[in-house]
Amino acid sequence: MTPTLAFGTVETVLGTLLVGVTEAGVVRLRWHDSPAERARTAAAVGLPVVDDPARTAPVVERLAAYFAGKRVPFDLPVDWRLTSRLQRQVLATLYESVPYGSVVTYGELGERSGAGVPAQAIGQVMGGNPIPIIVPCHRVVAAGGLGGYSGGSGVEVKRWLLTLEGALPATLDWDLERGP
């Protein structure tokens, strides 16, 4: 049987998220859905696209629950094909060891993963994460603050996600129904 790629979407306060799922697991999450984004993802993954709502449903359901403020584990299979060996080592460590509502610094994640690279390189790995939110790069912070974030509209999305999870206190104007 030839491997394939299926797409699903999730409406969130951050916009319509696009997820790509292969038979092996979640391979990509993008911050918006469009024909061009689907084409870029299909080209990057290198597999034919099929319509398979049953395959994407577990991912879509967990993401919808997460954005509804429910504490759900992302214990989903992950297809790491879009990552290098170093990225896979660091991102798999993040996925397996930094749970909902907690944070780790770039330096701590570098040590924990055994990657042998400095904190700045860990930040670059986070910036190249093909599966944000599910592989929670937003939970990786600088030793003295939030650090950067290349997902969505930037660091305010990171702040919003960490507030949703309770890792940061909510500001007076924070609202689950309204994004950053």
Image: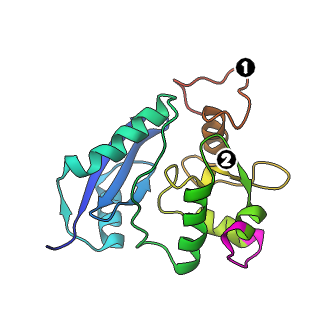
Coordinates of residue 73 in the picture (x, y in percent): 49, 43
x 33%, y 71%: residue? 45
Numbered label attached to residue 172: 1
Residue 128 visible at all: no
Q: Residue furthest top?
A: 172
Residue 139 lies within the magenta run: no
Q: Which image quarter holds the N terminus?
A: bottom left
Residue 4 appears in the picture as rendered: yes
User: Circle 1: is it few (<14), some (14-19), or many (20+) Cα within 10 Å?
Assistant: few
The numbered mark at residue 113 is none
**Residue drawn at (69%, 65%), measured in percent from left and top?**
123
User: What is the distance, in whole Å, between disc 2 and disc 1 at their CAs?
Assistant: 18 Å
Magenta span covers which residues? 112-120
Crowdedness near tag 2: few (<14), some (14–19) or many (≥20) residues, C-alpha within 10 Å: some
Marks 2/1 in contact by CB < 8 Å: the verdict is: no
- Per the image, label 1 sits on a secondary structure element best described as loop
Q: Which residue is mark 2?
A: 155
Query: What's the residue at 47%, 58% (across, down)?
Result: 131
Viewer-proximal residue, 39 or 19? 19
When the figure is inspected, residue 144 is found, relative to residue 1, above or below; the finding is above
In the rendering, at what x and y percent does residue 44 appear? 36, 71
Q: Amino acid at mark 2?
A: Val
Residue at image point 78% right, 55% down: 142
The x, y position of residue 87, in whole percent, is 56, 72
Closest to the observer: 75 or 5? 75
Q: Secondary structure at mark 2?
A: helix
Is the image coloured rainbow, by chain, by secondary structure, or in one colour?
rainbow
Q: Earlier in the sequence, mark 2 or mark 1?
A: 2
| Left or right placement of residue 43 versus residue 93 in this view | left
Is 78 positioned to the left or the right of 35 in the image?
right
